[in-house]
Image: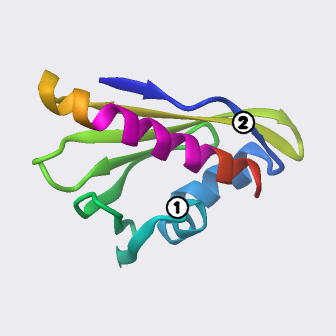
Amino acid sequence: MELNSKKVTVQKSASDLCSFLSDVKNFEQLMPENTNKFEVIREDAFVFALKGMPEIALEVKEIVSPNKVVLGAISDKIPFTLTGNITEVSARSSEAELLFSGEFNSMMAMMIKAPISKFIDTLSENLEKL
């Protein structure tokens, strides 16, 4: 299952945005209002929980500066990645798009598609406000 957020313009250069997304503690600023828990567990990993959803732990898997940051689930129970694709627009702004990619059975995919879509849209909207 693959889901894309809308592309948003962020008032940061591509390299600044890549650095921002590479620092996991910054994701707390991007989380939706219904976040019950956010905790940095390692320098490159954090765990979060949204109301009505299980806790999810993410870690930085790959950084291709200044164009891409890939986060992946630490647990194999829900294998997925969240990729931030960054395109430089000018010296002070860039475009960002989030891509969620995971392997789920059709029943699970049907259940999580709407909440995950809303989640990545909220993350991208909050990126736009930076």
Q: Which residues are magenta?
A: 112-124
Instruction: Looking at this view, name the residue that lies furthest to the right.
Output: 91
Report which quarter residue 78 is drawn in. Answer: top left
**N-term mark: 1 or 2:** 2
Seen in the picture, residue 4 relative to 64 is either above or below; the reply is: above
Distance from the alpha carbon under mark 1 to that under mark 2? 16 Å
Seen in the picture, residue 77 relative to 20 is either above or below; the reply is: above
Q: Nearer the viewer, residue 55 or 76?
A: 55
Disc 2 marks a residue whose amino acid type is Val
Q: Residues within 10 Å of mark 2 (few under 14, many from 20)?
A: some
In the image: residue 74, left or right of residue 45: left
Q: Which residue is mark 2?
A: 8
Q: Main secondary structure of the magenta part?
A: helix
Q: Is residue 69 visible?
A: no
Image spot of residue 89 (x, y percent): 83, 32
Q: Is residue 120 magenta?
A: yes
Q: Is residue 21 magenta?
A: no
Q: Residue at x 24, y 27 (%)?
A: 110
| Quarter of the figure that contains the C terminus | bottom right
Q: Is residue 60 visible?
A: yes
Image spot of residue 105 (x, y percent): 11, 26
Disc 1 marks a residue whose amino acid type is Met
Q: Nearer the viewer, residue 18 or 77?
A: 77
Q: Which mark is residue 31?
A: 1
Disc 1, SS: loop
Q: Residue at x 38, y 42 (%)?
A: 115
